[in-house]
């Protein structure tokens, strides 16, 4: 993944727990890099090692770390160089989710090593409900989606309740979520 992801993890840990905790996690993950270059590709393994070491040092599950990271990512990218990209991708939760593949296509023009996930969303039977399908070349990042959607809820002042209704790990073709939302 692009270094921006690892840089965001580092900045999240430093913000929430301080520099020393970050150094401890970095060492435990056997990451030699003192800093990450946002626009450079890194092996996915680096990210997975950071999540694993983070969970050991902080006493949280890997899923909890990934969820917290997903939530952090939404505001991080909005303030660290990608505010315009985020602004043009929608003014509310359903619109933003609809535009996510376009957002990734835009990033992919400049950064061809991007392996963008794909999100499809549908209005539910009830108003204020969405079905969200998530497909990715990568495995093991599904917990991040909970955080990403919650981060979008924060961004758009929208209460969200998200539950997983299908799991690729359990044999489904793709991961699927039910999102109940209420904009304030
Ligand atoms: F709900 O891969 C809201 O490296 C969401 O399955 C979900 O393949 C917002 F310059 C610049 C760059 C860089 C900008 F090249 C990424 F460095 C991308 C900024 C998306 C904002 C995807 C990051 C692929 C890296 C991936 C989980 C799960 C998507 C992370 C979240 C808005 C982004 O993001 C998976 C890669 C950006 C950039 C956004 C992502 C790669 C998302 C969201 N993804 C790199």
Image (cartoon, grey):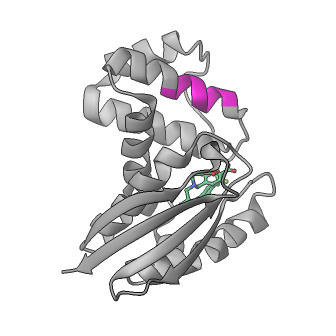
Is 65 within the magenta? Answer: no
Q: Is residue 52 left or right of residue 105?
A: left
Residue 97: x and y, percent? Answer: 51, 75
Name the residue furthest left.
184
Q: Quadrant of the C terminus?
A: bottom left
- Residue, x 36% and y 87% (percent of image)? 126
Quadrant of the rendered image containing residue 111: bottom right
Q: Is residue 88 visible?
A: no
Residue 170: x and y, percent? Answer: 61, 45
Q: Is residue 184 left or right of residue 116?
A: left
Q: Is residue 64 left or right of residue 44?
A: left
Quadrant of the rendered image containing residue 120: bottom right
Q: Where does ligand 1 appear, by image quarter?
A: bottom right
Q: Is residue 28 visible?
A: yes
Quadrant of the rendered image containing residue 94: bottom left
Residue 110: x and y, percent? Answer: 75, 63
- 162 relative to 100, above or below: above
- 43 relative to 145, above or below: above
- 142 relative to 183, above or below: above
Give the magenta-colored segment's residue range.
45-51
Is 48 within the magenta? Answer: yes
Name the residue furthest right.
112
- Residue, x 67% and y 45% (percent of image)? 2
- Residue, x 28% and y 65% (percent of image)? 154
- In front: 41, or 125? 125
Name the residue furthest front.
171
- Residue, x 34% and y 60% (percent of image)? 150
Please tell me whether the stretch drawn in magenta is mainly helix, strand or loop.
helix
- In front: 125, or 27? 125
- In front: 42, or 64? 64
Q: Quadrant of the N terminus?
A: top right
- 183 relative to 67, above or below: below
């Amino acid at each position: 993944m692009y270094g921006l992801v690892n840089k965001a993890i580092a900045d999240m840990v430093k913000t929430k727990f301080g520099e020393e905790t970050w150094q401890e996690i970095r060492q435990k993950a056997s990451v030699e890099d003192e800093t990450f270059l946002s626009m450079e590709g890194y092996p996915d393994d680096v990210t997975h090692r950071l999540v694993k070491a983070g969970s050991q040092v902080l006493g949280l599950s890997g899923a909890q770390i990934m969820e917290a990271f997903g939530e952090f990512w939404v505001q991080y990218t909005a303030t660290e160089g990608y505010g315009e990209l985020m602004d043009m991708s929608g003014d509310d939760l359903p619109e933003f989710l609809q535009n996510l593949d376009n957002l990734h296509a835009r990033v992919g023009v400049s950064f061809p090593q991007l392996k963008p996930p794909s999100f499809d969303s549908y209005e539910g039977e009830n108003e204020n409900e969405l079905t969200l399908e998530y497909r990715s070349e990568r495995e093991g990042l599904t917990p991040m989606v909970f955080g990403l959607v919650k981060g979008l809820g924060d961004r758009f002042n929208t209460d969200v309740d998200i539950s997983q209704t299908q799991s690729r790990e359990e044999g489904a073709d793709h991961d699927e979520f039910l999102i109940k939302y209420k904009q304030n």
